[in-house]
Image (tube, rainbow, N blue to C red):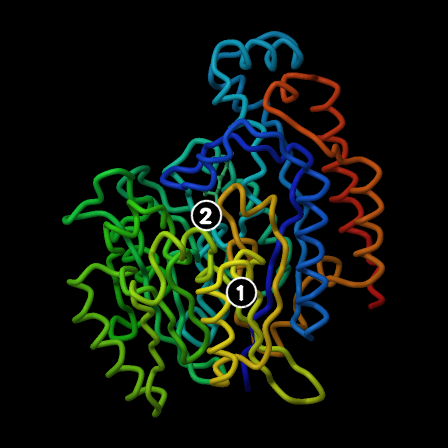
Amino acid sequence: MTFVDAQIDRIVGPTHHFGGLGVGNVASQNHAGQISNPRAAALQGLDKMRLVAGLGVPQLILPPQPRPDFTLLKALGFSGTPAEMLKSALSEDPVILSAAASCSAMWTANAATVTPSCDTNAGCPVMTVANLSASLHRSLESTHTLKDIASLFPNGFDVRPALPGGAPMRDEGAANHMRLSGSDGKSGLNVFVYGDGPPEPQCHWPRQTKAAGQAIARSHGLQESDVFHFKQHPKAIDAGAFHNDVVAMSHQDLLIHHELAFAPDSCQEIERLKRRFENVIQKPLRILSISSNELKLDDAIKTYFFNSQIVTASQSGKMKWTILCPVQVQQNRVTHELVNRLCAEQVFHAVHFVDLGQSMDGGGGPACLRLRLPLSEQEIGHLDTSALWTESRDSDLRAIINDRYPIELKITDLADIEICQRALETQEVIARCLRQDSGST
Ligand code: SUG
């Protein structure tokens, strides 16, 4: 039995905007207040899903979460009619208005941490939804995410609510988790990456704690010998690597990371990982450390090279590793040469460059936009088929987006009740479209 990585992406919502809300996220901060294009954002996301599905990879689609979140505005003391709440939020605290309307749930790599059934004693895949408690706008996601993910797996999946505990249990999901395995996807080793504890970064607050990774490993029933905790390098966090997947990527027996991804005292854990991998998988773990001489940390973060999405494409019965890089990787000489070299060395069989400009400007690349779910064939058969990517669903969604999404949005527009009501209706139209069983491919 082999395990295949299904991919879960979420459609970008109609209130997608640049609020500058991302903690320690340089791209988000640099684009704060600029005019966004929600329609382009949603279509760029769908283009990536089409590409992945076309490679023979199971692709699941979630609808946008309903925004603006009036419950938040009310809870934070805004009152009156919905129109009045929006107006007073804009004048009194536009950051709260922006948080209430944020479409950050599109970055599904932060939705949950996933343990496939082969790694746990639970007898089925286990997922813990991320609490995202480092930021206001992202902390709103977990209640809906729990419902959304649970609905994808009507049978036999254990989807758990976010960790309690607030700041000491800050958890950002799969973006800070790497699972290494053999080519059959079984017998995984789990690396949790955290940022708290000395030496601390000087400029940005680390978003993930070690205690959160430990709690998830414990509650998912992972064997202690197969769990590893790496500390993020404080220099990486300060340079804008607010998640590990901005400076490291992994797929099966491959781990590629920037030399400044992990703090020096993670060396022992890395050595233990190598030894354990060789014992369990019976072959060496391939670790490629990219030096600062070859690729400056700043360029790694600007291009999001390490946030490329690696998938195993099944083509004419052969399994080929394909890497989806942001177009920014192609536009930078160093990263373009690097990916070409990795292809020439057969680390990857093919590369595609994807334009995700609207997501990139909020600090999210291809890998941020997908949650990986290693599933057996039998488990794939249990998925809710109405969430699977199909040609007809793709064209229905494009029609809705082209018809209903704005092509320009600025923060002040979020105080316009008509724009917000239309956005909420559009979210419902998309959710209904995805619930219909128009299953043909
Ligand atoms: O949490 N950006 C997200 C980007 C998440 C990227 N995910 C991964 N690396 N896996 C974040 O910082 C920006 C919102 C704004 O600018 O309004 C934002 O939330």
Q: Are marks 2 and 1 in contact (CB under 8 Å)?
A: no
Helix, strand or loop for disc 2: loop
Tell me what residue is drawn at x 47 percent, y 55 percent. 303
The image quadrant of residue 401 is top right
The image quadrant of residue 181 is bottom left
Tell me what residue is drawn at x 24 percent, y 83 percent. 275
Mark 2 vs ligand 1: CB below 8 Å: no
- Label 1, residues with CA under 10 Å away: few <14, some 14-19, many ≥20: many
Q: Position of residue 355 (x, y in %)?
A: 63, 54
Which amino acid type is shown beneath numbered disc 2?
Answer: Pro
Tell me what residue is drawn at x 46 percent, y 47 percent. 161
The image quadrant of residue 186 is bottom left
Q: Which mark is residue 161?
A: 2
Tell which tag, 2 or 1, sits nearer the viewer: 1
- Label 2, residues with CA under 10 Å away: few <14, some 14-19, many ≥20: some
Tell me what residue is drawn at x 58 percent, y 53 percent. 149
On screen, 345 above or below 4? below
Rounded to the nearest whole Å, what is the CA distance between mark 2 and mark 1? 26 Å
Pointer 1 residue: 309
Q: Is residue 27 left or right of residue 351?
A: left
Instruction: Looking at this view, name the residue that lies furthest to the front.
Output: 333
On screen, 407 above or below 88? below
Which amino acid type is shown beneath numbered disc 1?
Answer: Gln
Q: Is residue 375 left or right of residue 230?
A: right
Where the C terminus falls, by quadrant? bottom right
Q: Position of residue 93 (x, y in %)?
A: 47, 15
Q: Is residue 137 left or right of residue 278?
A: right
Helix, strand or loop for disc 1: strand
